[in-house]
Each structure stands twice: as C-alpha cells, then as structure tokens.
Amino acid sequence: MLIKLFKRLLSKLIRLSMSGLDKGPHITRYFMYKRLSELKLPETEGKDLLSVSHSANLSELLGLEGCTITEANYPDYNLLSLPFPDNSFDYVLSDQVLEHLEGDPQDAINETYRILRPGGLAIHTTCFINPIHADPSDFWRFTPDGLSLLCKNFSKIIYSEGWGNPYVWVLKWLGFSSADGIPNSKWHFMHKVAMHNDPKWPIVTWVIAQK
C-alpha cells in the first residue's frame, strides 16, 4: 500500500514539474532523434525517398521534406521483398520496423541496398533492450554491432549506435510512456535521464549506411 502511494505521489510531482514546459519526443526516442537530426545531408530537393511502414516522421527530422516520398506501409508492402526496381531511391527510412519482420532481417537490409542508388542512404532505427511489443508480432532485437554486421555490404556505415540507461525503467515503473514528452529544458532531471547514455544498456539502436 505504501509503495503504491509513494509511486502515485512521485509520478504526480514529476508531471507537475513538467507542466507548461516545451517538450520533445518521449524518453526512448529523445536522444536518438536528436542524434539523427545532427546528420548533415546534401541538397535533398528532387531526391526520392522510401518511407517503410509509416516512417515518414524521420523525413522531417532529417530535413528531407523536399524529397519525393513514396510510402511502403505494411501489410501492403513487405520490407523483405519490395516491388521496386534496383537503384530507385536516394533514401530509405524505417523507424522501429526491423524488430517486427517475420523473416530474415538480412534479406530486408539487402532489399534496401538493392533499391538504393549509388551513394544513397539507408536509415534504420530499431531496439535492443525493450519489452515485447507486438505490431502485429515482435521477432528480433539488435545491438549496434549487429546492425553493422547486417550492413556489411554497404560502402560506408555513418552511424551504428544505441542509447539507453537503467533509470528509464524506473520511469516506466512510475507510469511514464510514449504519451509523455521529455522537457527540452536542460535543467530538468527528466531531460538529464533522457540524455544520459550507458553503452551497456542500449534500449534503442540505429544505423545509417551509405551504398
């Protein structure tokens, strides 16, 4: 009873402290999206971009709004076998998709390589230490080294990284979820937790590879 009361009170106090503050993404995306937004891309006007399974949010984050965007959303499209000719796109984006593939992830990475033009970028985000989240099913987990291995045929890996720390699970226990944005105020302890990265605890991982 006392634990439940403490949990409820602490959660309420934290939420009150964030009231009225400008907020960014939730805690498992905050650092990752900030890191991806730092990527300096060349002129994107007139380029072709493939968004896999509702990943177009990354196009704005990366400054790719000027691209012609093609949506390839599941179940109408399958990343394991895409109906596009070789060398069709300059960018391929998938945001938290790879873990849900019902098949060999290497086949999916090979497909993104195939449809990219020379010099094109594949940008994939996924997860490692994460609860099962069926959408519709959940099959895989990836370390940064695992993502690098999957992208071994690319000419260059720009980023293969991860973010996480054990304190995130305390906040999850307190009831904070994807509905709760992280304050952009650097002084706030939620911001500090969201920006703290322990390489031994990668909750989310990502790779940017160039063909």
Image (tube, rainbow, N blue to C red):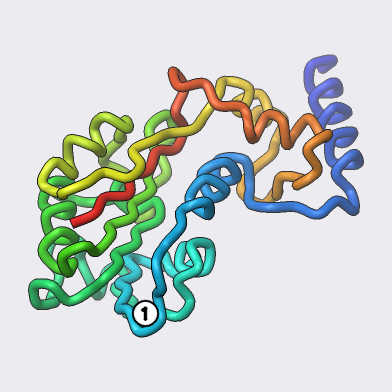
Q: Position of residue 18 (x, y in %)?
A: 85, 44
Does 179 appear above or below 77?
above
- The answer to whether 8 appears left or right of 173 in the picture is right
- The answer to whether 109 appears left or right of 202 in the picture is left
Depth check: give the residue in front, 8 or 126: 126
Quadrant, the N terminus: top right
- The quarter holding residue 159 reads top left
- The quarter holding residue 111 reads bottom left
Depth check: give the residue in front, 162 or 138: 162
Q: Position of residue 199 (x, y in %)?
A: 45, 22
Q: Amino acid at mark 1?
A: Ile
Depth check: give the residue in front, 111 or 161: 161
- The answer to whether 184 appears left or right of 58 in the picture is right
Q: Position of residue 107 (x, y in %)?
A: 11, 52
What residue is at 26 percent from the left and 44 percent from the top?
157
What residue is at 70 percent from the left and 48 percent from the top?
180
Q: Position of residue 96 (x, y in %)?
A: 39, 51
Residue ID for mark 1: 69
**Residue, far top:** 2
What residue is at 13 percent from the left and 46 percent from the top?
106
Does 184 appear above or below 64?
above
What residue is at 81 percent from the left and 43 percent from the top?
185
- Label 1: state its secondary structure: strand
Does 46 appear above or below 202?
below
Does 32 appear above or below 141?
below
Quadrant, the C terminus: bottom left
